[in-house]
Structures are given as C-alpha cells and as structure tokens.
Image (spheres, helix red, strand yellow):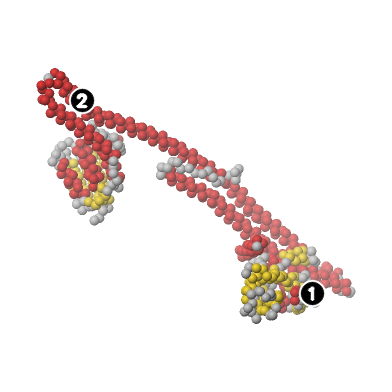
Amino acid sequence: MLEALGTKVFSGIVSLSLLLFSSFKGNDPHFGAISVRRSESFIYVSGSLQSAFENDFPSIFSSGTKIPIYFRIHISQDGKTLSKQRFSHTVSFDTVTGIYELDRGKTNELFRSDSIEDLIREVSKFNFAFPHQAHWEHLNIRIEAELPKVRFEQLNKQVDLMVLWKYKKPSTKAVANLRQLQ
Amino acid sequence: MHKFGLRSTIIFLFLFVSIGGLMVLNMAFQAKQEDIHGAIERMELSDELRSIKFLSAEDSLKAQTVMREYDSAQAVLSISLGDSRVVTSVVLLLVMIASSAIFIVVIILISKPLKELKQATEQIRQGNYSAHLPETGIAEMRELKNSFNVMSHELEQTQNRLLVAEKELIWKDLSRILAHEIKNPLTPIQLVIQRLEERLEYDPQKVSDILPESISIISQEIENLRLLAQDFSNYAKVSQPTRELFNPAQIIREIVKSYSQDYEICLDLQDTFTINFDRTHFYQILTNILQNAIDASSEAKPITIRLYGERSYVVLSIQDMGDGIESKNLSRIFEPYFSQKSKGTGLGLALVKKLCDANGAIIRVKSKIGEGSEFTLIIESKTT
C-alpha cells in the first residue's frame, strides 16, 4: 500500500519535473481497452499497451540483451483476492541475423521478425487465461505493467528501464460479470 | 535557530538549498557522464574491427562480440541520457520546492508575530494596557515581544499611578469646593443665630423685631445649600439621552421669555430646522450658558442668540458682551470644578459639555478680554 503510494508520488514528481525542466520525451504508456471472455472453465483477458515502446526502445531491443516486460494481474471479488498472477514478454535480438524474437512466457508462444515495428506491435499485445471457480461471479481485474532493472553484460552495467516510462507503471481495471459473459 | 539570528538563518538556509542543490545536480551529472563516456568508449569499433581478419570461425565470434558490445553501448547510452535528464529535472524541482517552502515558512514566522503585535498595539491604543504577547517564535520576534510586554507592563503601572494621583487630586479639589460652598451659607446662619441669642439674653421683649428677617436669611441660605446639592446631583446623574425630533427655535423662545423681562436678549432664529436631541438636556445646556452670559454681562449690554444652518448642521450661538475669558483659561472652562466666578461650583459648563457629548453635539467657545464670549453649539440637522 505504502509502496504503491510512494511509487505514485515519485512518478508524479518525475512527470512534473520533466514537464517543467526537461525536453526528455520518454514514453507515456497506458492500457487500451481490455477484453474479457469466458469458456467452460477459463477466463480469457486480452488487451494492449499503448505508447509504451516508441522512444528509445528500438535501440534497447536491438542491444542483444534480453529485455523482459512484466505484467501483473490481480483478480478480486468483493475486496477479496481470488488470484494473483505474473507473466512476462521477453524480447531478444540476434545481432548477426538481425532477427527479433519475442517470447510470450506462459503461452510458450514465440514471435520472430526482422521488423522493429512488428515487434513493438506484438510486444504491446497481451492475453492470458486463468481457470475460474464456480462461486466467482463479479470479478474486478487489475492489470499492471512494469519494466525491470537489466544488466548489460557486455558493459557490466545495470540500468533501470523504468526511466524510459518516467517511473510510471501503467495500470488498468476491468469489471467482469461472469453470468453475462460467454 | 536559538544561536543564530533570523537574517543568518535565512542566509544559511538559502546557501544550503542553492549550493547543496547545485552540488547534488553536479554529482548526478558527473555520475551520468561517466556512464555515457564508458558507453561511448565501447562504441569505438575501428581498432577492434581492424584486428579481426574474418578468416576463421573464431574471427566471426569476435565480430559478433564487438557488434553486441556496440549495440549494448548504444542502449546504455540512450538510457543514461534519459536518466540524466530525469535526475536533473527532479533535483531542480526539489530545489524549487525546498526554496518555496523555506520562503513560505520564513514569511509565516515573520508575519504571524507581526500580526499579533499589531493587534496588541491596537489594544494599547484603545487603553488596554494589560495586553500581553506570548513570547514564542523566532529569536528576534521573542525579543520584540518581550520588549513590548515590558513596555505595556510599565504603561499599565504608570496609568495606575496616574489614576490614583488623579483620584486623590479630584477628592482634594472636591473637598475644598464643598467646604468652601457649605461654609458660605453657614456663616450668615451662624451670625443670625448669634444675634438671636444675644437679643434673647439682653432684650427678650424685642426678639420678634428681628425674627422675620432672621428667618428670611436662614431660609435663603438653606435654599442656597439645596441648590448646591442639586448642582452636584445633576452633574453626577446625567441620564442616557431620550432623543426626539423638535424645532429648537421654539424651545429657545420659551426659555428666553422668562429672562427677557430683566435682561436684554436679542434673538435671530431661523425656524426651518429640526434636531434630534434630548429636550431636557437641550433646556439644561441653554439655561446654563445663558445664565453664565447673564452673570458675565452688565445689565446694559445685550446678549445675542442666533440659530442658523451650516451645511447639514444647525448652529446655536450665544454671545455676550461681558468681561470675556482669559485665553489661558479657555481650555479649562469645561473642566469640573473650574470657575472664574466668585460664586459657583464650576459644574455648570462641565455639565454642558457632558450633555453635548451624550447627544452627539459639539460645543465651542471664543472669547476676548473686554469684548465678551461666544458659545457655539453645533448639532446635526434632521429633515422632517
């Protein structure tokens, strides 16, 4: 709770100071519309991050170092936590072939392309599924994205990628009424 | 804050924030520049590339490593540049917030006690010398408040001493006047009684010859004593005015009627005015001033009463052609127990002043020795 508040205050200070004193563009990530579907035993959530990987990310993704992007999902009902999950998208780049590879983590789904634009489009999309219980009815789904600190082995240098998002973790909320979902 | 003065504290805080902020900014810049410099050094490919002959698989691996290092350095460079921009702008914002906070705190520390001081000074101005300020706040303000408290305490003590001295003086004056005024009628009464006693002793048959005259003298002096008591009573009991609208010219004519048989009183009255005044008080004011004018004038010299308007005021002027009042006494004639007449308590004009104040009127006096005096009463005019 305090950590979340601290993060919000800090990201607010960063945004204000950049607005006043800097020409640094960075990225202003936010979630687009979230889609929620259900099947017999699973709930599927999909959506995309927008304006998250435009500035500076092409050179980061092209560095050859693996760049993970984390998504956190928190599902609750009437204030009670039902499920917490974390998954990641990891981007890597082969400097010899010039091919980008996107590993969508849990789904073990791989995407390969030599186009940075295609990679950015794909890395921004996410979808995940989780099994639902019989008593789940009215779900509050909260999704948050985060960038980690990454070590560039060649330079033996660790950098916090959150600076490219101006230390602001994008998040969104969706409400799902399972009775109405098909 | 206890050892340093306000000025030193402000200078210290200003230097601390500005120089400290610049130092932090510089340190952040230096650190980031080192990162950037390191990244740029890694981007120097030419020497390493020249050493690769591209003849073996090992050479290909070397080339791949060089390219990876280049790409990594580019990424680190990009992030470091962004990071340095974020850090510098955050430091600048924090310096700005800290400077503003210090400015606001200093303003509050100065303005709040000044406001308290202003209110306390206002209390002193209104005569409340017991005003006391809590000696809190910054050192300079505590000293200022302490000086103020000492000053107000001394003023209060001085005021108390003055009040005691004034009361004592008033009682002395009052006792002197009362003794004198009571002794005056008592002396003739005593003489009459002595005369009656002598007659009873030496010629009792002829007591009746002097009895009517003796009774008349005693009655007259008792009447004088009663008037004296009434004067004091009137002065002590000035009631709250019950104001009503009336035409002052009419009242003046009625009052003057009883005097005009014995004295020459000239009237120049405009009938168009209405005043909002206590009718009894108006009567008391006019009779007192008129009696003084009569006492000051000889029978041949007329007294002039004029009533006229000036702007939104009604002016009543009573002018005699008597001996006049010495200029040194003009400022004292409305003081209680001050009198130039051989007979009188000195309460008449003091009562007039008191009644004028109670009704919101202003009284002024002009006088010249040998030419006479003029009392002017200024009353707000009311339209009917």
Tell me: residue B277, above or below residue A133.
above
Tell me: residue B99, above or below residue A11.
above
Looking at this view, is B51 or A102 the one in front? A102
Looking at the rendered structure, the kind of residue marked 1 is: Asp
Q: Chain of mark 2?
A: B
Residue B258 in the figure: left or right of residue A102: left
Could you tell me which residue is drawn at 36 percent across and 32 percent down?
B168
**Where is residue B267 drawn, in percent x and y?**
17, 46
Looking at this view, is B276 or B42 the one in front? B276
Could you tell me which residue is drawn at 70 percent across and 78 percent down?
A41
**Where is residue B2 drawn, in percent x and y?**
59, 43
Q: CA distance from mark 2 to mark 1?
A: 140 Å
Disc 1 secondary structure class:
strand
The picture quadrant where one finds residue B220 is top left
Could you tell me which residue is drawn at 77 percent across and 70 percent down?
A66
Q: Is residue B361 visible?
A: no
**Disc on res. A94:** 1
